[in-house]
């Protein structure tokens, strides 16, 4: 098989397409979570902490000097705190989604177990066919 043929086979497999859809949805979900953290969660936290905006928190190592064209060097720990909160929210959402999926799978497994445990009751047609078969065996 040629390189192009192998590549077509690889791309056309369902897993690759599922992964592509997951990446696209994940990117969009990331924007939603970023907005949730920045616009909804952090303002009340800032209010509770006395108007502190974590995004602006930083530890300046070297001040900016425009005359000498030196940029500020700082550790932006506030941005890191926002990112950690975003991660925790994403992890919580994924956990809840997986929990629901697992619950649905368990319900389906229980249904399958119930189906397997139920006795098979033959239909009237099956009973008649079995009788005909038995009659033919005796002759």
Image (cartoon, rainbow, N blue to C red):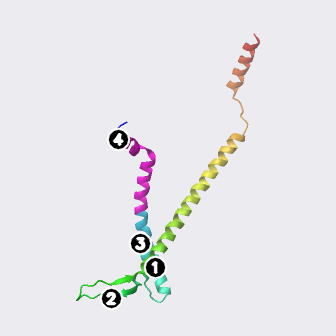
Question: Mark 3 or 4 closer to N-term?
Answer: 4
**Residue drawn 58% across and 58% down?**
100
Q: Name the residue that disc number 4 marks.
A: 3
Q: Name the residue that disc number 2 marks.
A: 63
Q: Quadrant of residue 61?
A: bottom left
SS label for mark 2: loop
Mark 2 → mark 4, Cα distance in angstroms: 55 Å
Question: Mark 1 or 2 closer to N-term?
Answer: 1
Question: Mark 2 or 3 closer to N-term?
Answer: 3
SS label for mark 1: helix
Question: Mark 1 or 4 closer to N-term?
Answer: 4
Q: Is residue 118 left or right of residue 91?
A: right
Q: Is residue 107 left or right of residue 20?
A: right
Farthest residue, direction left: 67
Q: Is residue 25 magenta?
A: yes
Question: Mark 1 or 3 closer to N-term?
Answer: 3
Magenta stretch: give its range: 5-27
Mark 1 → mark 4, Cα distance in angstroms: 51 Å
Q: Name the residue that disc number 3 marks.
A: 35
Mark 2 → mark 3, Cα distance in angstroms: 30 Å
Question: Mark 2 or 4 closer to N-term?
Answer: 4
Q: Name the residue that disc number 1 marks.
A: 42
**Residue drawn 35% across and 41% down?**
3
Q: Nearer the viewer, mark 3 or mark 4?
A: 4
């Amino acid at each position: 098989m040629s390189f192009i043929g192998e590549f077509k086979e690889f791309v056309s497999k369902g897993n690759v397409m599922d992964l592509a859809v997951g990446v696209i949805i994940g990117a969009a979900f990331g924007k939603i979570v970023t907005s949730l953290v920045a616009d909804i969660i952090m303002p009340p936290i800032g209010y509770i902490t006395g108007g502190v905006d974590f995004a602006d928190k930083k530890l300046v190592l070297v001040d900016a000097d425009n005359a000498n064209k030196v940029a500020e060097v700082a550790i932006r720990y506030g941005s890191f705190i926002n990112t950690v909160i975003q991660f925790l929210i994403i992890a919580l959402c994924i956990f809840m989604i997986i929990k629901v999926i697992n619950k649905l799978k368990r319900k389906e497994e229980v249904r399958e177990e119930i189906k397997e445990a139920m006795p098979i009751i033959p239909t009237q047609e099956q009973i008649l066919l079995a009788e005909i078969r038995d009659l033919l065996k005796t002759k």
